Image (tube, helix red, strand yellow):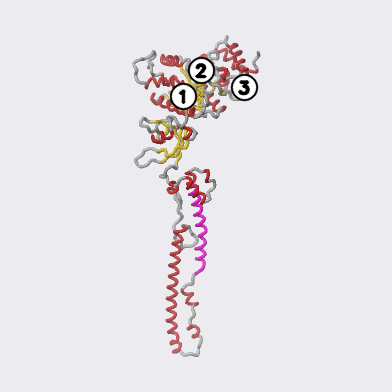
Amino acid sequence: MYDIEQLNAFIVPELKEIAEQFSVKGFKSMAKMDLVHAILDAQADKELAAGDSTKEKPQARNSTKRPSKKDKESSSPNKSDKKSSDSNEDEKGQNEENRPNDNKRRRNNQKNQSSNDRRKNNDKEQGRGRDHSHGSDSKGHQNDRRPPKKEYVFDVKVDGCIAGEGVLELMNEGYGFLRSGDYNYLSSPDDIYVSSGQIKSNGLKPGDTIKGFIRPPRPGEKYFALNKVESVNGMSPEKIKHRIPFDYLKPLFPEEKLNLSLEGDKNTLSTRVMDLFTPIGKGQRGMIVAQPKTGKTSILKDVANAIAHNHPEVYLMVLLIDERPEEVTDMERSVRAEVLASTFDEPADRHVKVSTIALEKAKRLVESGMDVVILLDSITRLARAHNTVSPASGKVLSGGVEANALHKPKKFFGAARNIEHGGSLTILATALIETGSKMDEVIFEEFKGTGNMELQLDRRLSNRRIYPAIDLVASSTRREDLLLGKEQLQRMWILRNHLADMNSEEAMDFILNHMRGTLSNEEFLVSMNG
């Protein structure tokens, strides 16, 4: 019989042969650990069936009563009984004849008693042999003292029987850890150690999403360790080795449009307006320029829900930097996406670390051919965090901004692109203006013109409680002809010419009044005259 440690020592072909002997169903398509557990289950079922079949034998043997000592005395042939019937013999003759018969009776009784003792001893030895061979539990008779059936208990110490997942973060020494998304990919008790040999042999990079088998920590170790890599970014490790690095992929203008409007839902006017005036494509680098209290977070939430509903193939990430904790909870509960956050009460280096590992994860997914969307709130506070942690260079711009502090935020925002042979990274970030801080104005001026889509929000509209508070005239998308159809593009030119002479309040009132009477943007464009 096999135990779990012996089965783990076998290779997969040997396990399949053993599974065939036990008649395991579907063993040809099973993995190693599935084969091990299936063989153990089949082995336990076979032993249980054999134990049930042996229960009847000792009961049948005990049901036949052995002749006792008194029965044998009564059934044994006694010559004295025959001769006692003769009443004509005298008393002396009876005594002389009964004395040898009494001696014979004693000898017969001793022989019968010794033979009974031998039979009992033999039965006990046979019962013990059956206990060791079968191990079944017989409750039908009292003389059975066999131990209960041994049950298989899961042994945690066995290697390679636990599945784990995480995002890889490399250390300076060459090894790494798989970080958990429950802790925003920061150090936590759920970290999984990855050796430098596994990183080199599998060609792993920072930000790779790795699934595999892990083992418990051995004596003297602190973390669970990765034993075997099953998949990297949803692909086999062999395919990942030949991927092209992100920096060498060809960037193109966005060509495939992300549909932001929900059919039949009149409450998503903000996404319908964006779908017409500032369309977003896969690979877009968009910026939402907003003053305080203009509803930028609500617009991000509507965009996230629209993308999650209309494009389930897109991997959506919401990155909240230096935001309020209650907004983080609200975003996690109202958006079907991965939410990574670092609130305003956290240090600046935590903001930088969370944003860096989120960007690395997105890059690795794009290298694997996936479409990724990152919604960042906000890039101004991310630049402030980088300015805090950057070393002093001696050159300070106006507003107290270090000369080299904005390089990494620009690298983050500039990573958005559409890849030539599949895959895209879309980043939609918010930028704060008119906050009373000179630093925020300098940061916005540095990022102005770097994106290919800009959505302007107006404080005057929000003061009048007109939502969405979008400045339609100032908002636009570069190369929108690649995203909109020819007929739709012509109607949008006519509509923009009509709105050009209006201010932001009049233009938004005009659009909202006409959109509320229609269910979709197509119906709205058809209802236009001319």
Q: Residue at x 35, y 15 (%)?
A: 395
Q: How many marks?
A: 3
Give residue 245's position: percent from left, percent from top: 45, 27
Which secondary structure type mostly characterizes the magenta part of the structure? Answer: helix
Q: Is residue 38 magenta?
A: yes
Closest to the observer, 68 or 412: 412
Closest to the observer, 3 or 304: 3
**Can you name the residue that lies furthest to the top here?**
501
Q: CA distance from mark 3 to mark 1?
A: 40 Å
Magenta residues?
37-65
Label 1 belongs to which residue? Answer: 248
Q: CA distance from mark 2 to mark 3?
A: 26 Å
Label 3 belongs to which residue? Answer: 520
The amino acid sitting under disc 3 is: Ser
The amino acid sitting under disc 2 is: Asn
Give residue 346's position: percent from left, percent from top: 40, 26
Give residue 291's position: percent from left, percent from top: 48, 16
Which quarter shows the C terminus? Answer: top right
Q: Secondary structure at mark 2?
A: loop
**Residue 330 seen in this snapshot:** no
Precedes in sequence: disc 2 or disc 3: 2
Label 2 belongs to which residue? Answer: 452
The amino acid sitting under disc 1 is: Tyr
